[in-house]
Image (tube, rainbow, N blue to C red):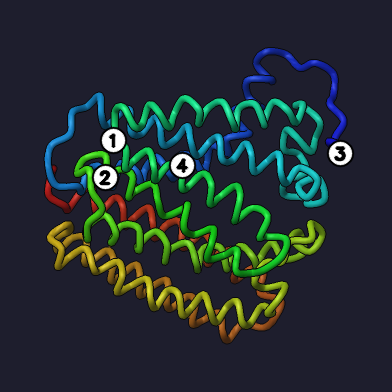
């Protein structure tokens, strides 16, 4: 039985369309679009524009569907948190079954389309990302801070999908991109767990900072940045990036590590530090992928 929401009066078509888009969490989907494009760009070999566009569209569609199913599963939790209580489902602007229908129907089309246009391996990775995000990560958030590491897997798969859509295989270059995105998510979401700690407490989610404390989360954020820097430089010996990228990766990584280290000297609560560190991780990733596009060889 569905609980926790009451659907409001019928909205205008424009408002309904806007809420459908919000189910897909467009900010997150735009990040996925960029990282998938990075995988396509860096992969060896030539890819036709229709294949690349189909890969981007299919990946974005599957990610949007995963977010819709996540919204359905977490609608009661979202209603308890200030950050999420105005989303379409907890606010009652959409019937929860709309999210279920989209979350099941869209992958039912997008994954076969990826198999047809981008290859069976890319389609398999899309299905794996969907399953991991919806069936493992989402329920684990209520039970264990290990959800941080599980959730980083589907978040790191899109650039690998871009890579395999060109090469048709798993190899070192694609796995290096996967590792880069996996490691980046750790400090990013550790910062989120600190500055939104009270919201997560209200929602009953067992994020890292609530279970182990702010200082432990901060220490893990620093350690994960120190891991991220050498992982980001792995692209150099593989011939996927040049000197310009190396400079951005080193300077950006040093600044991020410096900010994480500075945070260890800050008094509690660490909300302000965590917020600026979170924004810093976004700037870092944006600069890193801009450098990949600007200073890497064309496919």
The circle on residue 119 is 1
Residue 58 location, x and y as percent?
A: 40, 31
Q: Secondary structure at mark 2?
A: helix
User: What residue lies at 28% left-to-right and 47% top-to-bottom?
Assistant: 39
| Image position of 107 with respect to 185: above or below | above
Q: Earlier in the sequence, mark 4 or mark 2?
A: 4
Q: Secondary structure at mark 1?
A: loop
User: What residue lies at 68% left-to-right and 55% top-to-bottom?
Assistant: 139
Spatial CA span between label 2 and label 3: 41 Å
The circle on residue 3 is 3
Spatial CA span between label 4 and label 2: 14 Å
Q: Earlier in the sequence, mark 3 or mark 1?
A: 3
Q: Nearer the viewer, residue 192 or 261?
A: 192
Spatial CA span between label 3 and label 4: 28 Å
Residue 109 location, x and y as percent?
A: 47, 25
Kindly identify which residue carries mark 4: 127
Q: Secondary structure at mark 4?
A: helix
User: Residue 244 falls in which quadrant of the image?
Assistant: bottom left
Kindly identify which residue carries mark 2: 164
Q: Nearer the viewer, residue 272 or 25?
A: 25
Tag nearer the camera, 3 or 1: 1
Q: Are circles 2 and 3 on residues that touch, CB within 8 Å? A: no
| Image position of 108 with respect to 291: above or below | above
Q: Earlier in the sequence, mark 4 or mark 1?
A: 1
Q: Are circles 4 and 1 on residues that touch, CB within 8 Å? A: no
Residue 40 in the figure: left or right of residue 31: left
Spatial CA span between label 3 and label 1: 40 Å
Q: Are circles 4 and 2 on residues that touch, CB within 8 Å? A: no
Q: Secondary structure at mark 3?
A: loop
| Image position of 159 with respect to 230: above or below | above
Residue 251 in the figure: left or right of residue 30: left
């Amino acid at each position: 039985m569905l609980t926790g929401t009451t659907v409001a009066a019928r909205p205008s078509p424009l408002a309904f369309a806007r809420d459908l888009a919000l189910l897909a969490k467009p900010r997150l989907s735009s990040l996925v679009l960029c990282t998938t494009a990075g995988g396509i760009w860096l992969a060896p070999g030539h890819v036709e524009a229709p294949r690349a566009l189909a890969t981007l569209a299919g990946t974005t569609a599957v990610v949007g569907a995963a977010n819709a199913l996540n919204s359905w599963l977490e609608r009661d939790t979202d209603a308890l948190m200030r950050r999420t209580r105005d989303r379409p489902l907890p606010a009652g602007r959409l019937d929860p079954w709309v999210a279920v229908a989209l979350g099941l129907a869209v992958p039912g089309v997008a994954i076969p389309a990826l198999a047809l246009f981008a290859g069976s391996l890319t389609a398999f990775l899309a299905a794996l990302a969907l399953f991991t995000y919806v069936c493992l990560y989402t329920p684990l958030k209520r039970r264990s801070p290990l959800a941080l590491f599980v959730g980083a897997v589907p978040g790191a798969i899109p650039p690998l999908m871009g890579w395999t859509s060109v090469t048709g295989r798993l190899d070192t270059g694609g796995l290096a991109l996967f590792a880069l995105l996996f490691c980046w998510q750790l400090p990013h979401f550790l910062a989120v767990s600190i500055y939104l700690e009270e919201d997560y407490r209200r929602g009953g989610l067992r994020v890292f900072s609530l279970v182990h404390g702010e200082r432990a989360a901060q220490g893990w954020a620093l350690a994960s940045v120190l891991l991220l820097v050498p992982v980001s430089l792995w692209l150099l010996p593989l011939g996927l990036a040049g000197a310009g990228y190396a400079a951005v990766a080193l300077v950006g990584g040093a600044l991020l590590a410096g900010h994480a280290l500075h945070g260890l000297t800050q008094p509690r609560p660490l909300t302000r530090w965590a917020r600026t560190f979170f924004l810093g991780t976004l700037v870092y990733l944006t600069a890193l992928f801009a450098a990949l596009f600007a200073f890497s060889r064309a496919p």
